[in-house]
Amino acid sequence: MGARFEELAWRETPIGAISLRRRRDPALQVEVYEVKLDDEYLMSSLFPVAEIELARLGLAELTGDTLDVVVGGLGLGYTACAALDDPRVRSLLVVEAIEDVIDWHRRGLLPFAAGLAEDPRTRFVRADFFASVAGGTGFDTASDQRFDAVLLDVDHSPRNVLHPSHAPFYAPDGLRRLAALLRPEGVFALWSDDPPDAEFTAALTEVFASAQAHVVPFANPLTGGQSANTVYVARMAA
């Protein structure tokens, strides 16, 4: 057993100080890994269910046998690892704005994400996901490649964004720019900490052929009850 609390990494960034912490929870008797932005909690290894379901629900909509997938926002790596668990995934492009987060994985600081950085299908790109979409440059500057799925987990929700520059992405015009990067019948899936949002679902249906908001419940060991996140899944026309 290691120290009860350890700050594994810390760095000042344009959007605030980001840190990775490990602590021993004495009540649950588990090691907990947490990411904070300044004093705000971004993610915790105690609650990985919806991040995993983001990949599973998104990829379940696809019928192809060779899938090229983008994950926007690396974080603790749960979504990216779940995507690689699908044997149909032949390439995984992870778009992450903060180099330090990529470095956490390359240094092996997160034992539950072991193998992600070493998998030959994985490629990390340090870039602002939202700026890449808004600028029309796409995620892969080496080509004009389109993708079968884009799985996004950066902001708390379409209404609760980490930076004001992200907000236009969630309007129909922003979603259209994202849709241009998808192949026919391609999928866009989004994690949200808020309940289903009718206005955002309407924006999705304006752009995509179909859209659905999935409520993902999970056990909350801190409260002893249940909590829930939302995963939106939208699909392009054939």
Image (tube, helix red, strand yellow):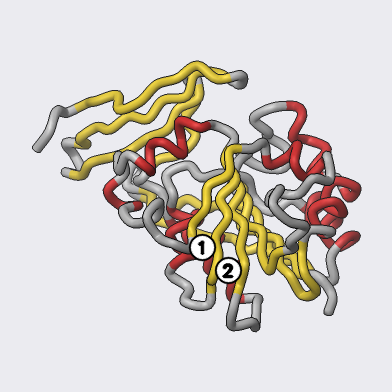
Residue located farthest toward the left when viewing the structure as drawn:
1
Instruction: Name the residue tied to disc 2.
Output: 57
Q: Do the residues labelled 1 and 2 touch (CB within 8 Å)?
A: yes
The spot of residue 168 in percent (x, y) is 83, 38
Give the Cα distance between marks 1 and 2: 6 Å
Nearest to the observer: residue 232 or residue 181: 181
Residue 185: give x, y in percent of width and height. 77, 75
Residue 146 left/right relative to 60: right
Left or right of 86? Residue 164 is right
Q: Which residue is drawn at 24% across and 25% down?
A: 6
Q: Is mark 1 on a helix, strand or loop?
A: helix
Q: Which amino acid does label 1 sit on?
A: Glu
The residue at the point 35 percent across, 46 percent down is 46
Query: Can residue 23 be seen from the camera position used here?
Result: yes
The quarter of the image holding the N terminus is top left
State the quadrant of the C terminus: bottom right
| Disc 1 target residue | 53
Kindly identify the amino acid type of the residue bearing the numbered disc 2. Answer: Leu
Front in this rendered view, residue 218 or 149: 149
